[in-house]
Amino acid sequence: MYGRVYASILQRAANSLTLYSGAQFQHAHAIAICCSQSHLPHCHFSFWGPSNGDESGNWCKSQRHLSTRQDLDFQQSRVQINSILRSNEQSVSVPEFDGRGLSVVRKFESNQLAANTPNEDRRSAATCLQSKGMLFGVFDGHGGWACAQAVSERLLYYIAVAMMQRHSLEELEKCMEHSRPIPPILQWYKHHTDFNYRESASLYIDNLRVFWQELLDSDEHESGMSPQDALDYAFKRLDADISLEAQVPLSNDLMRSTAIQVAFAGCTACVAHVGMDGIHVANAGDCRAVLGVQNEDGSWSALPLSRDHNSQNQAEVERIKAQHPPSESDTVVTDDRLLGVLMPLRAFGDVRFKWSCELQQSILASLESGVDLDSLNLYQYTPPNYLTPPYLDVSPEITYHKLRPQDRFLILGTDGLWDELGSEEAVRLIGEHLSGIHLQAPVSQSERKLKLGQMHELLLKRQARASPALDTNAATHLIRHALGTGDYGELSQERLASMLALPEDLARMYRDDITVTVVYLNYDLARSHHN
């Protein structure tokens, strides 16, 4: 039965492979059927693997070689694959000195690849103009893209405002009072495909202003918050504002509808503040931050700067259980999901897991006819065993790391990347991409005793590690390897093409949206600061 189901699914995928033509299409079709027989949704296949070859992988005489026409088709598919992979690339070089101070960030590279339509991931990057340091964030939306969009636009502002000194906040308030242009808070680095919620801009500015007014009212806010306190406070304050905006009357139906969608959808977030004093990472959910460290022998190791907040994190599960009566210990997290529904255990929005049932019903019932109720139907669902809310919060887990000379880069990624690549592998790929050096460990004593076929497999894996990079952008390099790595660590053209050619209604079954930002650190500056 399962074989027929997968055969049907993959048959549709093969029928939609627009990256192939002629004999290649037939070959991809055959791969899809072959994969269906394995009953595995994630299939590994190698373009250069033997079809009717001997044990060593040599081609048999009966194997038909690519014709000139097929070779041209292959090259064309490579061009199209590259076009898809690189369409959302971003690469920004940062001046070492910008007139305000030295920057520990040399440059950053970022990319996104969607599986959902539209993409539910978002990313942000900006320099703090009224304080010091740079901010980078990745945001993974669920229940739609609305919450991730709002958080990606707003969170960095909240963090930056919280770090501003009193006199800078007073200048902002004077400008607002006298209707003068306010001094810029952030220098944004936007991709040309990024957009903002224009219909809600005035609402967002008004609530940001209320935030800095409250900071001005505080006797303790003179020199601004530390990055750690600012990150913690900004996460919680923005989530509270998102919740409040969905409850209060707004000026028009479109703004009201947007506020409801943002609050009932959700997103996880991982944000890093990179400054001369080090890296502060705030994480809520299952995005991840990993530091790439170069060891004395030139090899690479990964230093986690965040922990995933999901059911695989037993401490996180126990934290949530402790917030509810013992009678709910078996229902709070079931089937590896919060109340059997939500995979991340911390998130923005998701008021279905935070508000009382009465409040949810009251808000949805109050919507006027002008609001698109069809788009809100999914919010009518109440999770099972919803007895003692809230079950979810956005309190970030914050990690601080003092920069060292061996710290070379920081990777921020949504869980779509980490579903396919481990942290160590991701760091190795970026490290070797950065240095151009592919270190190979000596053949061990146990490996020397391998049989011929096993030795051949070992050699293929070692050869794959030494393959030259196809992308100058490190984020694209990671995404290509995440989706296109074959059995021996080699890049499989056919696997990559098949993953990219899946139709919209199937793509999400095989992979998630992927967002990656790689931040390169000025290790020479870190060395002088470290000494």
Image: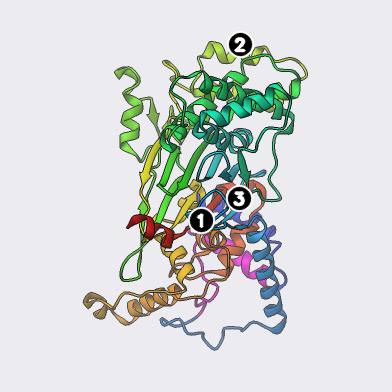
Of residue 146 and residue 332, the one placed in the foreground of this image is: 146
| Image location of residue 86, percent across then percent down | 64, 60
Q: Is residue 225 visible?
A: yes
Residue at disc 1, secondary structure: strand
| Image location of residue 291, percent across then percent down | 40, 54
Tell me the mark number nearer the camera, choosing from 2 and 1: 1
Residue type at tag 2 = Ser
Q: CA distance from mark 1 to mark 3?
A: 25 Å
Q: What quarter of the picture does the C terminus occupy?
A: bottom left
Taking the view exactly as shown, the residue that stands out farthest to the left is 445
Residue where numbered disc 2 is placed: 362
Q: Say if 196 sits above or below 366 in the image.
A: below
Residue where numbered disc 3 is placed: 507
Of residue 331 and residue 521, the one placed in the foreground of this image is: 521
Residue at disc 2, secondary structure: helix
- Please tell me which of labels 2 and 1 falls first in the chain: 2
The magenta span reads 24-52
Of residue 345 and residue 212, the one placed in the foreground of this image is: 212
Q: Which mark is residue 518?
A: 1
- Specify the quadrant of the image occupied by residue 475: bottom right
Q: Residue at x 61, y 84 (%)?
A: 65
Tell me the mark number nearer the camera, choosing from 3 and 2: 2
- Please tell me which of labels 3 and 2 falls first in the chain: 2
Of residue 447 and residue 439, the one placed in the foreground of this image is: 439
Number of numbered discs visible in the structure rendering: 3
Image side of residue 131 versus residue 462, left or right:
right
Image side of residue 373 versus residue 335, left or right:
right
Whether 39 is among the magenta residues is yes
Residue type at tag 1 = Val
